[in-house]
Amino acid sequence: MIQLGLDKVFPSAGHHDKDSGAVANGYIERDEMKLLREMIVAELKKRNHAHDTDADWETNRQYQNRIRKQLRTGDVVVDLHLNAARPSVSGIEVFISKNAGTDSKNMAKEALEGLCKITGTKSRGVRNDNQSQHFKIGILNMRGTAILIEFGFITNAGDMQRFVSKRAEIAKFLVDLMIKYDRND
């Protein structure tokens, strides 16, 4: 964790040490998202941009309770995930709160378009959290601009190959996007 200046972004790996997330095709969601989060954090450090992130041991509830105290309206929260379904199901989707503000909506659209372009994976669209398997996704309903990205399906070998091969480019793209939407200048 690093805190510099007033701008702050919050990338999180979505799962913790005792919650693997989805497992398929030799991949564990928690581990794949942890690798991506660490690449994002390294890039944020290179750019001296203030950030905070989830600790590997923290549950989602613990992380959300901790950052709730720091979040300001102009901050950015990005939660990183992989989806799971039948092996034939493919695509990237980005979730926002059903009560999302303009910046969350715009960031979600821009993230989806950029990720699909980088990976060549099809778009499944921007969706409200009540269109997910959960009625409400807590991390999306806090202060600031917030999106949850499903980078593809861990159960689809093609999605995973494209994601893994482009992970470094994805990390840099997401850092650019988070900094762009960080409004606490």
Image (spheres, rainbow, N blue to C red):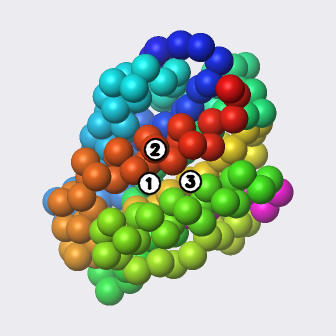
Considering the numbered disc 2 on the image, is that residue within a helix, a strand or a loop? helix
- Between discs 1 and 3, the one toward the N terminus: 1
The residue lying at 53 percent from left, 13 percent from top is 3
- Relative to residue 176, is residue 118 depicted above or below? below
The answer to the question of whether label 1 and label 3 lie on touching residues, with beta carbons closer than 8 A, is yes
Identify residue for label 3: 148
Identify residue for label 1: 81
Question: Amino acid under label 3?
Answer: Leu
Q: Nearer the viewer, residue 32 or 3?
A: 3
Question: Amino acid under label 2?
Answer: Asp
The residue lying at 72 percent from left, 52 percent from top is 103
- Relative to residue 122, is residue 27 depicted above or below? above
- Residue 176's mark? 2
Tell me which corner region of the image, top left, top right, bottom left or bottom right, holds residue 134.
bottom right
The answer to the question of whether label 2 and label 1 lie on touching residues, with beta carbons closer than 8 A, is no
- Write the start and end of the magenta stretch as one range: 94-99
Q: Position of residue 58 (x, y in %)?
A: 49, 27
